Amino acid sequence: MKIAIAGGGIGGLTLALLCHRHGIETEIWEASESLRPLGVGINLLPHAVRELYELGLRDALAEIAVETSSLSYYNKLGQRIWHEPRGLAAGYDWPQFSIHRGEFQMLLHRTVVERLGADRVHTGHAFETVLGTGARAGEPVTFRLRRRHDQAEVEASADILVGADGIHSAVRRHFYPSGDAPRFSRRMLWRAVTEAPPYLDGRSMFMAGHQDQKFVAYPISEPLRRQGRSLVNWIAELRVPDHVSDTPPRSDWNRQVDKSVFREAFAGWQWDWIDIPGLIDGAEAIYEFPLVDKDPLPRWTFDRVTLLGDAAHPMYPIGSNGSAQAILDARYLVDSLLGTRDSAYALREYEAERLPRTAGIVLRNRMNGPEQVMQLAEERAPQGFADIGQVIPHAELEAIALRYKQLAGFDRQSLQPARR
C-alpha cells in the first residue's frame, strides 16, 4: 500500500511517521519550497503527547518544549476564576508541552527525513486537482500538482490520498469548490513571542478576560527557561467593530502589524504577577490573524481520498486542541487501515470515528469551549468578585473543564484503556 499526503504540516508529518512505523509506504507533497521554523506557540495535550512518545520523540520534545504545570483563567481585573494542574502534575502518564510551532514542525520533518528518506518529501509541489479517486478496487488515486520552480505540471498516483494541507486545503476545495469559505467570528488575534522574566512558576499557562477581549500567554522554550528567562508566547484578542463582518482576504492573514492597533485596550492589564503591556511592548514582531473556522462537513472521504487536520475540521484555537486533533486523526487513520484490507472501507471507518467528534469540538469552541468560565464571570460579575464560588459554584467550573476534556478525548479516564 502506498499513501500520498498533500501537506507537510504537523498532521501530515505525524501521519507519515505512523505509516512508516507500520510498514506503509508514504510520500509527502508540500507546496512550500522549503520547510522553515515559522509560527508562534502551540500546546500539545497529553493524548497527543502519548502518540508522539510512541513514535520515539520523548527526549527530543523534552529538550525543546516547556512541560506545562498548570492552566489558570482570570477575569479582566486579574482575579483568578479557575486553576487546574496539567499533564503529569494532574496525574496523567504523559505531560502537556508548550512549544514553538515551527520548532515542532521542524522536529517532525527531520525525523521523517531520517526514517523515510529525503526522497519521500517533495517540497515545492502545490496540489491542484484530483484526477481519479480510485473508485474501483485496484484502481489508484491520481492527482496533479504544480511544481513551483518551473510551473510544470506533475501527475502522481497512490493507493490513498490524504489531504492534510490546512485550512485553505486544495484537496478539500476539489470536493467543495463553493460555499466553504472560512467563517469569521468578528474577532482578531495578535500573536507574538517576547523574551521576559518568568511569571508564576515559569511553566504556567494563563488566559484572562472574556470572549470579546482576551489575553493568553505561556512559555515555550525549555532551553531559555533553564537559563532563568522565559520566551513567552502570547495572543491578544479583541472583537472588531460591527461593520467589519466579512472574513479578511487571505492575503491579509498573518501580516505583521504595529502594537498600536490593539495595545491601548490592554494598557491597564498589569497585575502583581504579570505585566501584559510589558509583554506587548517587548515583542520584536506582532502578527495579525482573523479568528476563523469552517462549518463541519457532511463527509471527508471520497472513495480513496480523505481529509485530515485543519483540512478536515478547522477550528478556533480554543482549548489548545487543534494540533492534538490532527495528531489523533493520523493515529485513527492508521489504526483503521491496519484493521482491514479494504482501504476504502478503512477511510470510511476513520471518518465515522473522527468526523462527529471533531465537529463537536468545532461547535463547542464557538461556545468558548473551556474558556466559557471567563465569559460566565464577565456576565455574572462584570465589576469583579470577592469569592468566585459566589459567582460560579466550584461544581459548575469543574463540570465545564471535564466536559471539554471528555469531548476532546483527553480526560484521564479516556486515556487509560490498553492500546492496540
Image (cartoon, rainbow, N blue to C red):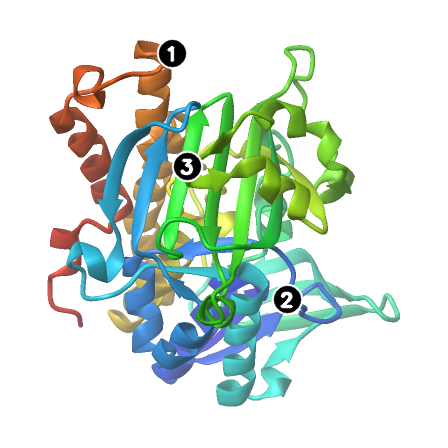
Q: Is residue 419 above or below residue 382?
A: below
Which amino acid type is marked by label 3? Met
Asked which secondary structure carries label 1, the reply is loop
Expressed as whole percent of the image width and height from the top left, the position of residue 38 reads 65, 61
For label 3, the residue is 207
Q: Is residue 334 above or below residue 293?
A: below
Residue drawn at x 72%, y 49% is 285
Residue drawn at x 30%, y 76% is 54
Q: Tell me if 114 is positioned left or right of 348 in this view.
A: right
Q: Earlier in the sequence, mark 2 or mark 3?
A: 2
Using the image as rendered, state which of residue 24 and residue 202 is in the foreground: 202
Residue 138 visible:
no
Q: Is residue 1 above or below residue 184?
A: below
Q: Tell me if 317 is positioned left or right of 383 in this view.
A: right
Residue 150 visible:
yes
Q: Is residue 317 above or below residue 185?
A: below
- Give the label on residue 37, or none: 2
Expressed as whole percent of the image width and height from the top left, the position of residue 99 reads 47, 61
In front: mark 2 or mark 1? 1
Label 3 near label 1: C-beta < 8 Å?
no
Residue drawn at x 30%, y 43% is 357
